[in-house]
Image (cartoon, rainbow, N blue to C red):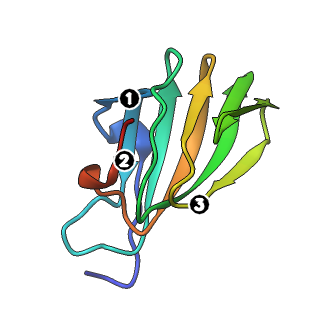
């Protein structure tokens, strides 16, 4: 791997996810440090949590709420949320976000009650 990576979100195929659709940048077998996702939240997301993953959400477009351990908080563009492992969370409403996943996103670390 080079000392850098560059991603162009509009050239990454979207994947269905519990929140809507995601484009995952830097998801490569030789990168375990972090990934960055552009997520189009199409509907209310399913409540989930991660045992190892920390997430940082940045709201780009739209308004709604973020549910964190059962509490709802309003969000709008330029809101940022730091979500630690074990925090049950979901987005409510239609919005576009950037999600920084640390370490790199692992689909096996997505848990639903």
Give the residue furthest to the left.
29
Q: Residue at x 49, y 25 (%)?
A: 45
Return the residue at label 1: 18
Q: Quadrant of the C terminus?
A: top left
Q: Nearer the viewer, residue 82 or 31?
A: 82
Residue 100 percent location from the top left of the image: 53, 56
Looking at the image, is 11 positioned above or below residue 16? Answer: below
Q: In x, y percent, where is residue 30?
A: 22, 75
Whether residue 47 sits left or right of residue 4 in the image: it is right
Q: Which residue does the numbered mark 3 point to in the structure image?
A: 84
* Horizontal and vertical percent position of residue 106: 29, 57
Task: Give the distance between the C-alpha atoms of the residues marked 2 and 1, in whole angstroms.
Answer: 14 Å
Mark 2 lies on a secondary structure that is strand
What is the quadrant of residue 52 in the picture? bottom left
Distance from disc 3 to disc 2, alpha carbons, whole Å, reads 20 Å
Q: Left or right of 50: which side holds 87?
A: right
Q: CA distance from mark 3 to mark 1?
A: 18 Å
Location of residue 86 in the rendering, given as x and y in whole percent from the top left corner: 51, 56
Which structural element holds mark 1? Answer: loop
Badge 3: how crowded within 10 Å, few (<14), some, or many (20+)?
some
Which-is-in-front pick, marks 3 and 2?
A: 3
The answer to which of marks 2 and 1 sits earlier in the sequence is 1
In this view of the protein, which residue sits in the foreground, 109 or 32? Answer: 109
Ranked by sequence position, the earlier of labels 3 and 1 is 1
- Between tags 3 and 1, which lies in front? 3
Q: Is residue 94 left or right of residue 53?
A: right
Q: Mark 2 sits on what residue? A: 24
């Amino acid at each position: 791997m080079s000392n850098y990576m560059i991603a162009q979100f509009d050239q990454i195929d979207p994947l269905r996810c519990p929140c809507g659709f995601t484009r995952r940048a830097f998801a490569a077998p030789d990168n375990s440090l972090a990934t960055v996702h552009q997520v189009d939240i199409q509907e209310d997301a399913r409540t989930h949590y991660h045992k190892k993953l920390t997430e940082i959400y940045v709201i780009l477009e739209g308004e709604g709420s973020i549910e964190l351990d059962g509490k709802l908080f309003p969000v709008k563009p330029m809101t940022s949320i730091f979500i630690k492992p074990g925090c049950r969370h979901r987005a409510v409403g239609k919005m576009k976000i950037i999600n920084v996943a640390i370490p790199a996103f692992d689909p096996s670390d997505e848990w639903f009650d």
